[in-house]
Image (cartoon, rainbow, N blue to C red):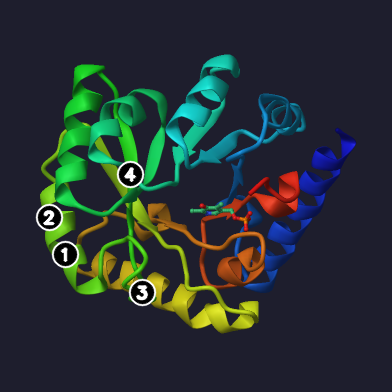
Amino acid sequence: MIVIKENLAIIQDCIASAARRAGRDPASVSLVAVSKKKSLSAVLEAASAGQNIFGENYLQDAKEKILACPEKLSWHFIGHVQSNKAKAVAELFDMVETVDRLKLARALDKHARNCDRILSVLLQVNIGRDPKKSGVMPEDIEPLLTGISEFTNLRLKGFMTITPFMANPEDVRPFFRRLRRLAEDFQERGFFADLDQVQLSMGMSADFEIAIEEGATLVRVGTALFGPRPV
Ligand SMILES: *Cc1c(COP(=O)(O)O)cnc(C)c1O
């Protein structure tokens, strides 16, 4: 039980150091604790140590935890959203980081409206152009941003990416840099009102410090916080 608390303190130190190395305010980076396949008690342990944003990939598993946790926690959906799950995702989560198609955005908007919620969303960008990965290709971002801007109950906050696996985390750096440049391009062209507010969700246990050096505002860390997951 103590381990999660200790891991959290270590990760927060690493986040702060990486931010300072990059000349950034450590408060500009938030940790998303990825609790997929982890128990309710692990989540509560992290929450009692001050962690308040959690990331989940599997709806059913997440639902039980969300309903059992204090309401003040914030939940990010970070898995692939099947369209028939959009209603439950819109009802349960505060942010959906994995919007990659207009049809899904439309469904999330409709269900958010029906339950009178405003849902924050990120576009998942396939920055490595990996045909096996989900996410919108860079050239398809613009029409999707334009379409989403008309949805009243979605707030588009920025981009998320899952980078290709690299044995050496340093080799992931160019992908992080590319995502940040894309966000800057769209900001310059008026797609995001305020770049200071644009969220970049990138970096996981193996490479979150590099992601922060390259501009991440959200890092999604599971293993380094909660230990290895059951397969
Ligand atoms: C599982 C997962 C993570 C966390 O990965 P770790 O290597 O355990 O830190 C981050 N992002 C997404 C989208 C995931 O599915």
Q: Nearer the viewer, residue 217 or 5?
A: 5
Q: Which residue is mark 3?
A: 130
- Decide which of tag 3 and tag 1 comes sooner along the chain: 3
- Decide which of tag 4 and tag 3 comes sooner along the chain: 4
Which quarter of the rendered picture does the N terminus lie within?
top right
Q: Which residue is mark 1?
A: 142
> Splitting the image into 4 quarters, where does residue 20 fall?
bottom right
**Which secondary structure, mark 3?**
loop
| Marks 3 and 1 in Cβ contact (< 8 Å) | no
> Splitting the image into 4 quarters, where does residue 73 fall?
top right
Q: Which residue is mark 4?
A: 121
**Which secondary structure, mark 2?**
helix
- Horizontal side of residue 179 vs 38, given as left or right: left
| Marks 2 and 1 in Cβ contact (< 8 Å) | yes
203 up-or-down from 12: above or below: below
Q: Residues within 10 Å of mark 1 (few under 14, many from 20)?
A: few
- Decide which of tag 2 and tag 3 comes sooner along the chain: 3
Which mark lies nearer to you, 2 or 3? 3
63 up-or-down from 166: above or below: above
The residues tagged by marks 3 and 1 sit, at their Cα atoms, a distance apart of: 19 Å
Quick check: can you spot residue 29? no
Q: Nearer the viewer, residue 189 or 157?
A: 157
| Marks 2 and 3 in Cβ contact (< 8 Å) | no
Q: Which residue is mark 2?
A: 146
Q: Which quadrant of the picture is home to ligand 1?
A: bottom right
Which residue: 75% across, 60% down?
14
| Marks 4 and 2 in Cβ contact (< 8 Å) | no
**Which secondary structure, mark 4?**
strand
Q: Residues within 10 Å of mark 3 (few under 14, many from 20)?
A: few
Q: Position of residue 163 (x, y in %)?
A: 47, 70
